[in-house]
Amino acid sequence: MAWLPLESNPDVMNKFLYNLGVPNKWQIVDVYGLDPDLLAVVPRPVLALLLLFPTSEKYEQHRAAQEAEIKEKGQKVSPNVFYMKQLVQNACGTVALIHSVANNTDKINLGDGMLKQFLDDSQPLSPEERGEMLQKNEGVIDAHKVLAQEGQTEAPDPSEPVNFHFIAFVCKDGNLYELDGRKSFPINHGPTFPESILEDGVRVIREYMSRDPDDIRFTVTALTAVE
């Protein structure tokens, strides 16, 4: 099974979130650069960061090494982190958006709709079971299909390999978590606060960029309050 990939396009992503019941007091915005002066113009509060990056052999090697180290040494993960596996090809944009919203429902007053129902129903499930539920959720699938065709570039065939991947960064119970549906578990990147998630998330994003320094195809967006 494969879906059409979502663009890293705030207009498309916002329409998708609003269709799922996210109030329009929240929005996805572009982060135009990682220097302090450009981060300063990002509306606050920031609830989550989303990174779209080119997958590569270096990413796969780092992912394998990182997971092996964590399995050996262990890590602390809050039971309040909502995490789901990505089981559908090209669904990473939707998974990252769901991760961003699901871990901020204390701030986002979700309206009745597909996403609220999905989160309520999937709350007691394992990450794998949540992923299985998503791939059967016709409401989310239909919303994804509609918006995936509204981007600025021509939508590829769903079966074509897409060498880009979305992940999300959220603050939960005092720690910064990287939520990548292709990894085995959330990655705890250490202490953070709601006021500093942007800067702390950018620190990890810079590490991603440093592993592929010759590639400039990285895109960062943020889930923020409407100004």
Image (tube, helix red, strand yellow):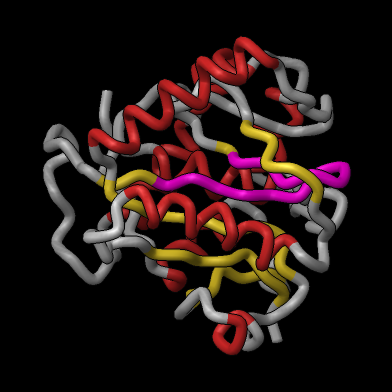
Question: Which residues, given as a range, are shown in magenta?
Answer: 166-178
Residue 55: which quarter of the image? top left
Q: Residue at x 59, y 51 (%)?
A: 20
Q: Quadrant of the C terminus?
A: bottom right
**Is residue 50 depicted above or below 188 in this figure?**
below
> Residue 142, how many percent across, how many down?
40, 42
Nearest the viewer among 201 and 14 is 201
Q: Is residue 192 left or right of residue 3?
A: right
Q: Quadrant of the N terminus?
A: top left
> Residue 46, how many percent across, how many down?
71, 67
Q: Residue at x 14, y 61 (%)?
A: 154
**Is residue 41 depicted above or below 151 in this figure?**
below
Q: Is residue 174 left or right of residue 153?
A: right
**Is residue 43 depicted above or below 3 in this figure?**
below
Residue 178: which quarter of the image? top right
> Residue 138, how many percent across, how many down?
45, 32
Nearest the viewer among 69 and 194 is 69
Give yes or no for residue 65 being in the magenta stretch: no
**Is residue 118 depicted above or below 21 in this figure?**
above
Q: Is residue 96 left or right of residue 27?
A: left
Predominant SS of the magenta segment: strand
Residue 19: which quarter of the image? bottom right
> Residue 136, how many percent across, how many down?
46, 22
Q: Residue at x 73, y 23 (%)?
A: 75
Q: Is residue 106 left or right of residue 183?
A: right
The number of numbered discs placed on residues in the rendered structure image is 0
